[in-house]
Amino acid sequence: PGPRGHTHLDLRYLLLADGNTDPSPGEGESPDARWFSWPEAAAVADAGLAGALVRAMQLA
């Protein structure tokens, strides 16, 4: 078990798109899904995601 008595995994995906297509989440998925520019993503990222975004920007 993890530090709080449970274990979980965080999965993150990087999708590169031209931003001209609505992500169109399926039934039962979050209607708030949307594309982010790099600055927008950095502005809402938590500490764990911020480092991953920096690396992703280097790879993109």
Image: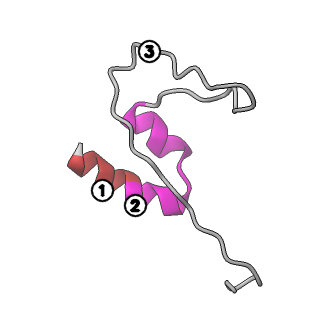
The N terminus lies in quadrant: bottom right
Tag count:
3
Residue under the image location 70 percent in, 32 percent down: 30
Q: Mark 2 points at which residue?
A: 51
Color encoding of the figure: secondary structure
Q: Which amino acid does the dot numbered 2 rest on?
A: Gly
**Disc 2, disc 1: CB below 8 Å?**
yes
Using the image as rendered, state which of residue 47 and residue 55 is in the foreground. Answer: 55
Q: Give the range drawn in magenta.
A: 37-52
Determine which of the numbered discs, if any, sits on residue 21 in the image: 3
| Circle nearer the viewer, 3 or 1 | 3
Q: Which amino acid does the dot numbered 1 rest on?
A: Arg
For the residues labelled 3 and 2, the Cα–Cα distance comes to 27 Å
Q: Is residue 8 magenta?
A: no
Q: Farthest residue toward the left?
A: 59
Kindly state the secondary structure of the residue where label 3 is placed. loop
Residue under the image location 58 percent in, 20 percent down: 24
Using the image as rendered, state which of residue 58 and residue 33 is in the foreground. Answer: 33
Left or right, residue 31 beside residue 50: right
Q: Name the residue under label 1.
A: 55
Q: Earlier in the sequence, mark 3 or mark 1?
A: 3
Give above or below for 10 relative to 7.
above
| Circle nearer the viewer, 3 or 2 | 3
